[in-house]
Image (tube, rainbow, N blue to C red):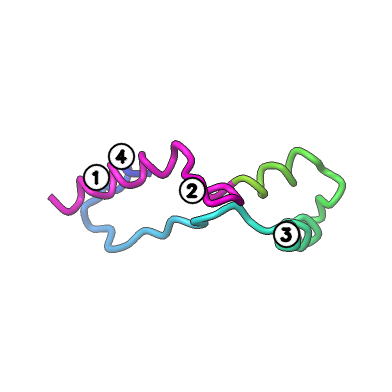
Amino acid sequence: MFAALRANPGVMAANFVWMSDLPDSVVEDLTKYYSLAGNSNFREYLATLGYFDKNGRAKPAWDVLRREAAAFTQ
């Protein structure tokens, strides 16, 4: 994503979601929405998209996001 942003300086904004892993209730709703409620791989994928886990611990992606985003402010 950051390589694409660097290659396209006209892009004015980017949205990075989600800060934390999604609550089980949201994961349940999304798997139903996408008609994949029985797909455990999809459920696990959705449940772990955050930069922080459900206990508030930063994942490696958080350091990458911070480092790459900081390069845009220099």
- Nearer the observer: mark 1 or 3; the answer is 3
The one of 29 and 56 positioned closer to us in this rendering: 56
First in sequence: mark 2 vs mark 3: 3
> Tag 2's secondary structure?
loop
Which element is circle 1 on?
helix
**Mark 1 and mark 3: Cα distance apart in space:** 32 Å
Q: Nearer the viewer, mark 3 or mark 4?
A: 3
Residue 55 sits inside the magenta stretch = yes
Residue on which disc 3 sits: 30
Numbered label attached to residue 3: 4
Answer with mark 1 or mark 3, whichever residue precedes in sequence.
Answer: 1
Residue 8, image x, y percentages: 25, 49
Q: Which residue is mark 2?
A: 51
Task: Give the vertical position of 74 relative to 15 (above or below).
Answer: above
Residue 25 in the image: above or below residue 68: below
What mark, if any, has residue 6 been given in the picture? 1
**Residue 54 spot, x, y in % from top left:** 61, 51
Q: Amino acid at mark 1?
A: Arg
Query: 5 left or right of 57?
Result: left
Q: Amino acid at mark 2?
A: Tyr
Residue in front for this viewpoint, 67 or 53: 53
The residue segment tinted magenta is: 49-74
Compute the Cα span from label 2 to label 1: 22 Å
